[in-house]
Amino acid sequence: MAVGMLLLAASAAWGLRGEPVDVKAVTTGDNSERIETIPIEKNPGKLRTALKLDPGDMPDLVRNDRLRVSAELLATTDCLFRSDRCAGSPYEFNPTIDTFLVLDSGRDEIKLAEDRRRCLQEEDERQHHCQIAFKGVDASEASNRLDCETSRCSLKVTIRAFNSSADGSERIIIGSNKPNGNIVQDKARLNAIRVRPAGRLPEALRSRPVRDDFAPVLKKVVLYSQRVDALKAGEVLEASVDARATTEHLGYPALLGTQIVLTEGRAQRHPGDAVRRVASLDGEITEISGTNCTPKQSPCPIVRTGIVRMREDARAGGEEIPLYVNVIARSKAKRADAGQGDVVKLMDNGGLKVRRYTPTPDPTP
């Protein structure tokens, strides 16, 4: 209750518009993945493009624009033993996965950010799903160096996997897989925001947790909520969450699934009709995605990021309404039955951050 009261008090001062700028936001949106699997090689090898904003999809750029980019990707290890689920040969080793966020002019490219991790596959600490996220990366200098004003620059996420025990027949899945072997995607996005003039970024609105635990029984709860008042057509919200969760006290792993959504209420777990009407992507700032959190690897990161653009003013029934950026979570016990009172504990790290970009008004005719 104390946390909720604190958030309500803070909301009165938050959600104010920043200085108007010429802003354009683009995203790969739904079904962004370009590949289904990549091979696990013995040594670091060929990089494959998992996500891409082609030159024609990028915002127009001139020298000294601010270019801010972000991305999410889900990489999943394959089966431990031969079954219908397998996309390649079974394996028990922990593959290393390299992921890069890259700006490419067609003649040259610059790596804006990189992520290297071991995706744990061994039975007693198996992650299975590894969530990769690049939050709020400034690509302005890289855009100038590549002369994106005259070059046809693209933005992409490239990925490779390797382990000294691999023979190349093993696979990492981009997305997740079902017991029948079907690969499920629509769990990734690549985003870019161009701001002109570059200037100072809008101040980030910061929210502490609404609650600090959730039950491992797939019931959705709201972990964070940020109220944003008087959103207008053309405004862009950039949201990210950085937290940690633990199952160490449970003694069994739990699948942690999260999503950032725009809603009409602090307690809502899905975008409502009004949000789907006025916001891009039906108000889904990120896709639903997650990872398995094991006791051995706890605390486990919850890192998500995405953008949404207002297509219309936030109104319902002819009245202006506030909207809420909510972080939704659910979990499921793995290799065990959840006991009554069992909870996954949230260890807040950086919390939820929301930046609000307000466009320059159209000139009067």
Image (cartoon, rainbow, N blue to C red):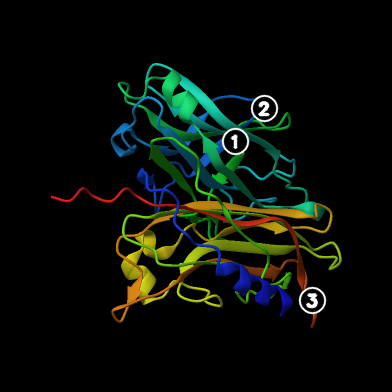
Is residue 270 rendered to the left or right of residue 152? right
Of circles 2 and 1, the one toward us is: 2
Of circles 2 and 3, the one toward us is: 3
Question: Mark 1 packing: few (<14 Cα in 10 Å), some, or many (20+)?
Answer: some
Q: Count every numbered label the image shows and give the total.
A: 3
Nearest the eye: 41 or 185: 185
For image coordinates 47% across by 39% down, the residue present is 68
Is residue 31 rendered to the left or right of residue 303? left
Q: What residue is disc 3 on?
A: 342
Q: What residue is disc 2 on?
A: 42
Question: Mark 3 packing: few (<14 Cα in 10 Å), some, or many (20+)?
Answer: some
Residue 36 at what x, y percent from top left?
48, 45
Q: Are marks 2 and 3 in contact (CB under 8 Å)?
A: no
SS for callout 2: loop
Q: Are marks 2 and 1 in contact (CB under 8 Å)?
A: no
SS for callout 1: loop
Residue 88 sits in quarter: top right
Nearest the eye: 32 or 312: 312
Q: CA distance from mark 2 to mark 3?
A: 41 Å
Q: Earlier in the sequence, mark 2 or mark 1?
A: 2
Which label number is shown at residue 169? 1
State whether residue 322 is above or below residue 359.
below
For image coordinates 70% across by 50% down, the residue present is 80
**Quarter of the image that includes the N terminus:** bottom right
Q: Earlier in the sequence, mark 2 or mark 3?
A: 2
Q: Are marks 3 and 1 in contact (CB under 8 Å)?
A: no
Which residue occupies the extreme top position in the image? Answer: 107
Q: Is residue 282 shown to the viewer in this render?
A: yes
Residue 137 at what x, y percent from top left?
54, 37
